[in-house]
Image: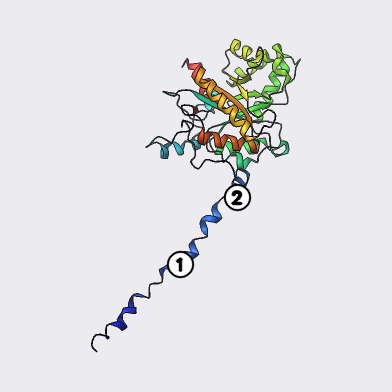
Amino acid sequence: EAAPEPSPEAPAAEPVTEPETAPADAPAPAEAEPAGLAEQLASAGTAEPVLPGQRVGQLPTIGTQSEEAAEPEAPVTEEAPAGLPALVRYAAPFDMTGIGPTVSVVLLDVGEGRGGLDAATVEAISFPVTIALDPASSNARERAGDYRAKGFELAILASNGLQRGMTAKDVEVAVEALSTALPETVAMVPAPDALFQIDREVVKYLAEALKIDGRGLITYARGLNVAGQAAEGAGVPHASVDRVVDEYKEDAAAVRRLLDRAAFDAGQKGRAVVVAHAYPETLKALYDWVASGPKGVTLAPVSAGMIADRAGR
């Protein structure tokens, strides 16, 4: 009967109560998730953020993910000398050295009133895009500040203020007003249906006005592209849009097909530029395309190609 005596000591190991604290901490992660982005992009399929300079459809390069992940914050600090042209001064950081074919996305932030997404959803984009804002929209300056704080480069969306038949002075005054409203911008892009871009005299005046602060001009590769000709003639940095991927509010599948064609274009000529609107279907398509798109194409801000062209690269 001496054997049963150790048994009362066995329960001594039971007073461990640490597991009781675990359930109290468990709910915290769920509260931190942003519901808005998850709801609006439920079918958008990328789990890994695409970093600046990362190739579409490929994993981030080993050893560079942590360094590049911090890069989007860089443009917020205005450390570039004031004398630099706006294209360089406000460009998102991007090194074109050794980069193969690139696709640049100019995203027109049309606002919720025109079927676009809210600023919080747009600024959550995890891959490089150039966001174009209409200075005439009521909260353009506020949205611009939010996007710059997240590291995006911006362009002026010229949907108002410029018209056919304007004089040189009219254009100069209009460009100054637009640039003053959104000063931290790299370029100007007309709305796809803006008629002033087919007026030879107006686009000539526009190119000269953009030279004052050193902004670039983004035009559309349609017809004679007289706006592009004017930019080249004036020595203004210029990018030509190959495709508007959602001009008729196409669904996500159609947008992805056009993005694939843009990637093919980039493979043929080295670079491609597309314009997209910040519509829910478009953003879903962009996320899915970035996650599973064709290999060998690198996403780049539009300024990168314009600066490289200027440097003769």
- 43 in relation to 24, above or below: above
Residue ranking furthest to the bottom = 1
Between 127 and 208, the one lying in front of the other is 127
Q: Of 288 and 135, which appears nearest the observer?
A: 288
Q: Position of residue 114 (x, y in %)?
A: 72, 36
Q: Which mark identifies residue 21?
A: 1
Q: Image height check: is 239 above or below 136?
A: above
Q: Is residue 85 visible?
A: no
Please identify the residue farthest to the left as the structure is shown: 2
Q: Is residue 278 left or right of residue 299?
A: right
Residue 118 showing in the rendered view: yes
Which of the numbered marks, if any, corresponds to residue 266?
Answer: none
Identity of the residue furthest to the top in this view: 233
Q: Residue at x 65, y 41 (%)?
A: 118
Q: Residues within 10 Å of mark 1 (few under 14, many from 20)?
A: few
Say the numbered circle drawn on residue 35.
Answer: 2
Q: Of callouts 1 and 2, which one flags the residue occurring earlier in the amino acid sequence?
A: 1
Residue depicted at x 40% and y 34%: 61
Q: Residue at x 60, y 50 (%)?
A: 35
> Where residue 255 sits: x, y (%)?
62, 31
Q: Nearer the viewer, residue 20 or 58?
A: 58
Looking at the rendered structure, the secondary structure element under dot 1 is helix
Colour basis = rainbow
Measured as percent of width and height from the top left, residue 5 is found at 27, 86
Residue 135 is situated, as x and y percent measured from the top left of the image, at: 68, 31
> Distance of mark 1 from mark 2, alpha carbons?
27 Å
Residue type at mark 1 is: Thr
Q: Quadrant of the N terminus?
A: bottom left
* Crowd band around label 2 with a 10 angstrom C-alpha radius: few (<14), some (14–19), many (20+): few
Classify residue 123 by image quadrant: top right
